[in-house]
Amino acid sequence: MKVLIVEDQERLGRFLKQGLAEHAYTVCWVGSCQEARDALCETAYDAIILDLGLPDGDGLELLREWRKSGFNEPVLILSARDNVEDRIKGLDLGADDYLPKPFSLEELLARIRSLMRRHSSAKDTVLEHRNVRLDLLGHMVHIDGQTVDLTSREFALLEIFMQNAGRILPRTLISEKIWAAHYDVDTNLLDVYMSRLRTKVDTIPDRPLFRTIRGVGYQLV
């Protein structure tokens, strides 16, 4: 399981990375809001451990941004802010758990396990449409039984369509879910990714998976 740690204190960050790695987690540790955004653009994670006091912004605002853009993976806030108001605000913004500092590694690991159990049971882990099979937990895509390699953004794009099969999705809605709100959603970046995705998964020439709705967006048919 892949975990992203967002923690600016070097000593604590190294401790968390080593502790989770020793329990068979694949760990990426970053120390700022921007590094966290970049990490999520590069690959998908199963859970995030998020500090609130970061050098280039507030972790709560980062959490708000993630939830607004459609990132639904478990987020555990790990913070020295221990008052009730901060806990309530963090949970209301979309955190799945809140663990105050100082803490024990054993409790942190137990909370991560609990989050993953709740998260995996709360959603379908395999989505299927026509000849496409998308495995959310395994992060794999099969077309007619054959594995297809997708980048993290291509995978996220396909997941949105698979979860909304038959629905016409506006360009702005798709873009806001794939890229954070601060990106310019009026560029042709979405068209570039749609072209790449079609090349990889649209394997039946006379029965295309995607329809382009001119001036509106796209539809998985």
Image: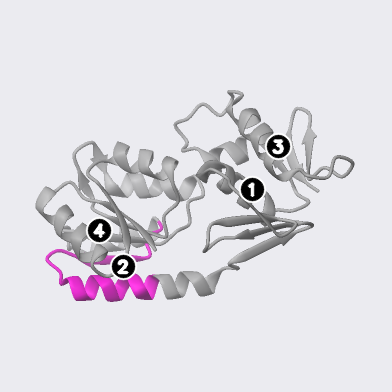
Per the model, the C-alpha gap separating discs 1 and 2 is 29 Å
Horizontal relation, residue 37 to residue 85: left or right: right
Give the residue at mark 3: 199
Q: Looking at numbered disc 3 in the image, what kind of residue is underneath it?
A: Thr
Per the model, the C-alpha gap separating discs 1 and 4 is 36 Å
Give the residue at mark 2: 24
Per the model, the C-alpha gap separating discs 2 and 4 is 31 Å
Tag 3, which secondary structure? helix
Q: Which mark is residue 86?
A: 4
Mark toward the start of the polypeptide (1 vs 3): 1
Q: Point out the stretch of residues depicted in magenta.
A: 94-115
**Mark 3 vs 2: CB contact within 8 A:** no
Tag 1, which secondary structure? helix
**Image quarter in which the N terminus is found:** bottom left
Tag 4, which secondary structure? helix
Q: Which mark is residue 158?
A: 1
Q: Looking at numbered disc 2 in the image, what kind of residue is underneath it?
A: Ala
**Mark 3 vs 4: CB contact within 8 A:** no
Per the model, the C-alpha gap separating discs 3 and 4 is 46 Å
Q: Looking at numbered disc 4 in the image, what kind of residue is underneath it?
A: Asp
Instruction: Indicate whether residue 26 is drawn in magenta.
Output: no
The single residue placed furthest to the front in the displayed view is 146
Marks 3, 4: nearer the viewer: 3
x, y (%) of residue 31? Answer: 22, 44
Q: Looking at numbered disc 1 in the image, what kind of residue is underneath it?
A: Leu
